[in-house]
Amino acid sequence: TTERVELAVIGRQRPAVIEALGAEFTLHEVAPGDDVAAALGPAAERVRGALSNPMVGLSAEVMEALPKLEIVALFGVGLERTDLSTARERGIVVTTTPVLYEDVADTAVALAMDVSRRITSGDRWVRAGGWAAGGHAGAGRRFSGKRAGILGLGRIGRMLAKRLEAFDMRIAYYDPRPAPDVDYPLHRTGLELARESDFLFLCAAGGPGQRHLVDADVLAALGPEGVFVNIARGWLVDEAALVDAVVSGAIGGAGLDVFDDEPNVPQALVEAENVVLTPHIASNTVETRADMDQCMIDNIRSWFSTGQATTPVP
Ligand code: 8YV
């Protein structure tokens, strides 16, 4: 009999992934927050693959606890909690699911338009009976034709730009690595970009040193008519400064899919009328989740049958 390859399942994974891989591999599920080495016991010595997600990732400590680890498959694209340098040293392959960019870009458009045209706010008002009571809905601000600033012109930023072009927006960007193949004006800093934007979209992947990339100064530069959208990561923003900016009117509004301490959202944001809040759903469509499932399954299967992953991090 051939021994089955053993995999550690870190954090919650989708049933379709568990079912498909469980038919071919021996899975050891580790509950979120549990010590991986302790939870796996002697199996830690045998585990050759790990499944995780970007918000949990795979730390150097966990890699250390898994001496035979060959591959880490992440359900998503964020790499900030996975120790890439340890993985590189050990020759561990890290894979992501690079199939979600369109949905995330769509969500950025939806949030920006929702805030500026007061869609969710209007919905609340209709449901609360404000319209039937004979009131007048307050005016929003135009979305089309405005100046869009994209902070981080990676794959999400580029797909967002393409969508915003259809709304006749004037697009500019800031990225520490300038993109030679685009015509959009590049600003030297995020602050400068914010100053020249009506809508500021945070699309940065976020590496070391990017914490609070968007701070009080950037928000002040965006200004009282400006709208800030975040579909990247909460920790890239000084959330206390964002709360201040929204409450004081230093910015016009914000559309936020990600937060510093998910699932906790600051109460001041919950109470703010000029803010739209979504629960980290930018990539959460039936179609994309199914593609992400398949991507993860393909990477693991392919690695253990051919020695090649399908979507490794370069
Ligand atoms: C997912 C994400 O919602 O890809 C990422 O980095 O943050 C999102 O796509 C998340 O990874 C689900 O675990």
Image (spheres, rainbow, N blue to C red):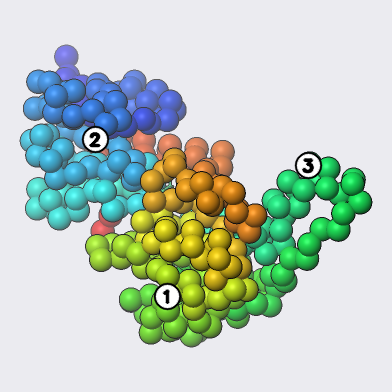
Disc 2 to disc 3, C-alpha distance: 48 Å
Q: According to the image, label 1 marks what residue?
A: 217
Pick the front one: 44 or 135: 135
Quarter of the figure with the N terminus: top left
Rendered position, 4 above or below 262: above
Task: Give the left or right position of residue 137, taking residue 302 as reference.
Answer: right
- Label 3: which secondary element: loop
- Label 2: which secondary element: strand
Disc 1 to disc 2, C-alpha distance: 41 Å
Amino acid at the residue labelled 3 = Ala
Corner quadrant of residue 225: bottom right
Quick one: label 2 or label 3, which is nearer the N terminus? Answer: 2
Q: Give how far across and how far down residue 221 sits, in percent.
A: 49, 78
Disc 3 to disc 1, C-alpha distance: 36 Å
Q: Give how far across and how far down residue 134 sits, in percent.
A: 91, 51
Rendered position, 101 above or below 95: below
Residue under the point 38% across and 80% down: 189
Amino acid at the residue labelled 2 = Ala
Q: According to the image, label 3 marks what residue?
A: 128
Residue under the point 42% across and 30% down: 14
Q: Nearer the viewer, mark 2 or mark 3?
A: 3
